Amino acid sequence: MASTSGTLEIHDTRTDKNYTIQVTDNVILGADLAEITACTDGVAEKPNKQDRLRIFDPGYVNTAVIESDVTYCGDDEDGNPANLEFRGHSFDYLRKTHDFEDVTYLMIWGKLPSIFERNWLRRELAQACMDVPDSVINVIQSFPKETPYYPMLLGGLSAFLGANKDSIPAMSARNLYHDNIKALDRGCIQTLAAYYMVLCAVYCHRNNRPFIRDVSLDRPMLDNLFLMMGLIEDTTSTRSRAMLHAINQVWISGVDHEMNNSNSALLHAASTLADPVSCFMSALASSYGILHFGAVESVYTMLQRIGKPENVTIAIAAAKATRQRIMGVGHRVYKSRDPRIEPLKGLLHVLAAEGMKDPLLDVAYEMERQIHQDKHFVDRKLCVNVDLYWPLSYTAMGIQQDAMLPIFLCSRIVGMMTHWRESMLKPIKLWRPLIVFNGVRAPKDEEQQEMAPVPVAEARKLSWPDQIAISLLNLPGVPRLLTAVA
Ligand SMILES: CC(C)(COP(=O)(O)OP(=O)(O)OC[C@H]1O[C@@H](n2cnc3c(N)ncnc32)[C@H](O)[C@@H]1OP(=O)(O)O)[C@@H](O)C(=O)NCCC(=O)NCCS
């Protein structure tokens, strides 16, 4: 294989100029391209931004925005299996040998924990959960019980932030987090704890359960959460152990996914030096669309509509005929195989053997079989993604459809905070993309005067009929002289 570094020689036929652009690990700097301009010598020493060569990349399909050593995910275009790795460990290895508590430490602090470090995390997280103020719970309980999860989650987090004004850099006009390890570690733990408590309170509120802040140091946080939500009655019965084992595995495989939409929303906010809760709220809000995590919930609705495996053929045909997207199909990175699916299917099999199986699992199997044989999808490199199966792991355990995404986010928040912490230890550069402006430019100054709307203060001096007439006529091009009617 050719070297991944070298130079790119560019000849610009517009100006007959040559440029040499540095390539490092298959990456060129966008800023280097900005040196290429349409200006010929002598026209402008400093070309304006419209004259600079820019990259137009709607949807960021080929634009890297940050260097990160956290998560690797890749497709198998070289014939190698697609893989997903966290901090240099394959997720498959981690899910077989570690639990979610270990993986939480690994993600945020970059190494698997010693017993001491694991205990430290457990203690810190438990204490932070106990410290979440009652005002947060009160805000959540003030929502009507049937309010969907997301608005209540965001409401609870807002209340948490409101009660922690000192954590907001704008309140003190100071950088609080960048390059401040102590504040970063605290920010990660507090944000995790805030989300965990908010979720438990929302879950209990929606399900008419009393919310009891029962966080024990003798249990991993995952076990605490499932007990507080009443999803398990104890941690020792066979069924509880099977559920906790399954959730550990599902959460490990879902802990992060490199630079996806919600991580980039989080880092976008982080680049302004915002507090971690606000950054997480940005990510949370962006995750709910049906092309992203909203797909988890939508897949289940789709499977319910299809109902049984025999209906899959007609459902796919109808989607193709109406050009509807099939939820749980297609991925920006994985074009032939999502590496998370086979392990998840194995887990679903184990759960089924324990008597925990959603009958819609057979619809998903049939959907996958047909999609992978259908020329329409094969030609477009559309394979099924893990969202086709994730919902079924939750519903198999009796978790309601609308709760599965908020519960899944207990895992993904770890990846999010990992990216936040990592970005705060790198040089700060405000994220500020460009547009290709294709609107109408403002007229020259004197014309602008001519076309300017009548100032409100002047218009107020007019009689009512004249004010109405002017507001109707106050369109671009109507001469300012209209004020003369006064
Ligand atoms: C995930 C997703 C947004 C990635 O999209 P993308 O990489 O930007 O791909 P595009 O939106 O450019 O789609 C490329 C082509 O595949 C088609 N396509 C993509 N996903 C499709 C789907 N789920 N069902 C049917 N067709 C799909 C598009 O219509 C387009 O077809 P065209 O070239 O004939 O116009 C997209 O596959 C999707 O919407 N999937 C469904 C939602 C989902 O499962 N999201 C969870 C992702 S983990």
Image: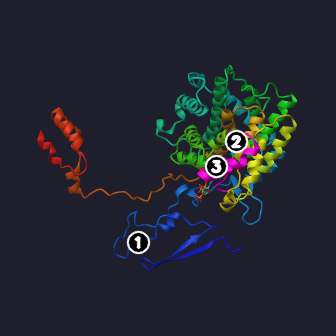
Q: Secondary structure at mark 3?
A: helix
Name the residue carrying label 1.
38
Disc 1 marks a residue whose amino acid type is Ala
Name the residue carrying label 2.
306
Q: Residue furthest bottom?
A: 16
> Which image quadrant is residue 394 in?
top right
Label drawn at residue 318 = 3
Quadrant for the C terminus in the image: top left
Marks 2, 1: nearer the viewer: 2
**Distance from the alpha carbon under mark 2 to that under mark 1:** 55 Å
Q: Which percent across, then down, holds residue 100? A: 76, 40
Q: Secondary structure at mark 1?
A: loop
Residue drawn at (51%, 52%) of the image: 431
User: Which segment did they paint magenta?
Assistant: 305-333
Quadrant for the N terminus in the image: bottom right
Mark 2 near ligand 1 (CB under 8 Å)? no
> Which image quadrant is residue 266 in?
top right
* Mark 2 or mark 1, earlier in chain: 1
Categorize mark 3 by other alpha carbons within 10 Å: few (<14), some (14-19), many (20+): few
